[in-house]
Amino acid sequence: MAFTVRSLLICESVAASCRKILEENGIKVGERKSVSKDELLAEVKDYDGLIIRSGTKVTADVINAGKNLKIIGRAGTGVDNVDLDASTRNGVIVMNTPNGNTISAAEMTCAMIMCLARKIPQAAASMRAGNWERKKFMGMEVYGKTLGIVGLGRIGKEVATRMQSFGMKTIGYDPVIPAEVAVTFGVEFVSLEQLWPQSDFITVHTPLMPSTEGLLNDETFAKCKKGVKVINCARGGIIDEEALLRAMESGQCGGAGLDVFVEEPPKNLCLVNHPNVVACPHLGASTYEAQERCGKDIAAQIVEMVKGSSPVGVINAQVLSCAVTPETKPWLQLGEALGMVAKAFAGQINGQTEFQVTTVGMSLRNTEHCIATAVTLGLLREDVEHHINLVNAPFLAKESGLNIVTKLDDAIPGGLTNVCTLEIANSSASQKFLGTIQVGHPVLLEIDGAAFKQAVPLSGNLLIYKAVEYPPVLQFVAGVLASAGIQIESYNVTTAMEGDHWCIMRITSLLVDLNLLKSYVKISRQLSI
């Protein structure tokens, strides 16, 4: 996948090192401390990429307006302020900095736990008001208490290890992190149904998505210990704010530490003003160290991707990691070329056409899905309205009803290995193409089981036809091409299959009308790779 970024707009305040790294690597940078939606809609068309924090909403209309947009870099972790579906549909890479604010967010969570346990903010406010109210702010030790952690990724792990040093028991749940991994950093893995009633404190560290929105609600609060204290330094909406207020007023919830809100800044201040709530204006990543780290990381990640290094922090296109490694990049080129050949034969692709990608050989293990994505590029390149690349190919394939299955074999008949086959089938016909990599370049070895006498490089303008091989056929085809001012650069032919041969010519330009060949040729197709 060709990936060039010449200009980037930094939409929010980030560390100065971010701009410095980008400009040192030849990327033109525009910078705005804040930008309204209307301003972003007007400006995004002039840039190849955006760098944002949590304050900029990159909606579908912004992405659609960004005709040159290739990348959206989030200097932080959460990307819920970016429309991922619209980004993927348009082939725009969405990237975050997975490690940049981990420590700052974890420390913020730990600080919230301690503030809730000892009522430090409330006591400080009372002192500023001229009061001395020791009994009013009686607190509790965290030693010996149970901390329930929902989400055991980077931040959840750091919170766990820090609060263990205070003598807290840590239990947790994560739909992705296995129990055997959680135990390595001292967390007892439990189900959510077990976590709610066991926890004295509950902290959430998940993305905001349909499965986590309103995760703590009236029903789950009712399952918790009476007086449970909850912390949300992740994303507003994971805790149902109205349910939290009801739980606070009933005493079912004994306190809340909130750094994030559904609406930021919140207009409804009922929770913010509640005496048992510690509220902050989304400060989790607001440390000098985190901002410096995130700014450097996002700039470095973009630069490394442009240089062709393996991408870090890509949210919506893991296949890109295959596209830049020297070992797999040629195989993706082969997959795309085979897809283009198959498209030339299949014509209009619909849901009735089936495709099977088979990778053969241990060296290609775990690459079949990447190669299938590249095949999709070749199949859909001429058929979709959107610019297609490795980012949006799976999305557009699904939308087009394209049915691609993958298979891995150790070897195929004849003992061939380290090859890739693409089979296409519909109600009327089927075709099978077999290719491999030779000297770093994709080549075609067989069509429908008929082997070419020499491997055919998959590049340039190719004329593929099936006919009985005898001199008059070749002379006829050459004559048709010559009369159109087209020269033959190379010629390859297969062994005979039921009297016919597959022939491939590499020619200087495509023939305008293939019907000119039908006097001698049974099947003819052409394409430019």
Image (cartoon, rainbow, N blue to C red):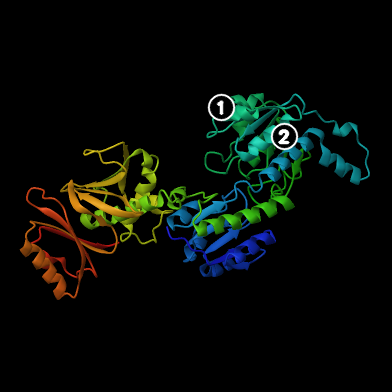
Q: Amino acid at mark 1?
A: Glu
Location of residue 117 with respect to 35 vertically, above or below: above
Quadrant of residue 120 within the rendered picture: top right
- Determine the CA span between mark 2 and mark 1: 20 Å
Residue situated in front as seen by the camera: 205 or 23 = 23
The numbered dot on residue 218 is none
As drawn, is 329 to the left or to the right of 478? Answer: right
Residue visible at 80% across and 28% down in the picture: 141
Residue visible at 86% across and 39% down in the picture: 123
Q: Position of residue 423 (x, y in %)?
A: 24, 46
Tell me the SS state at disc 1.
helix
Q: Position of residue 476 (x, y in %)?
A: 9, 67
Tell me the SS state at disc 2.
helix
Q: Position of residue 502 (x, y in %)?
A: 15, 54
Residue situated in front as seen by the camera: 418 or 93 = 418
- Crowding at dot 1, Cα within 10 Å, few <14 / some 14-19 / many 20+, comes out as few
**Could one spot residue 400 in this view of the protein?**
no
Q: Which residue is mark 2?
A: 162
The numbered dot on residue 180 is 1
Q: Amino acid at mark 2?
A: Arg
Quarter that holds the N terminus: bottom left
As drawn, is 516 to the left or to the right of 397? Answer: left
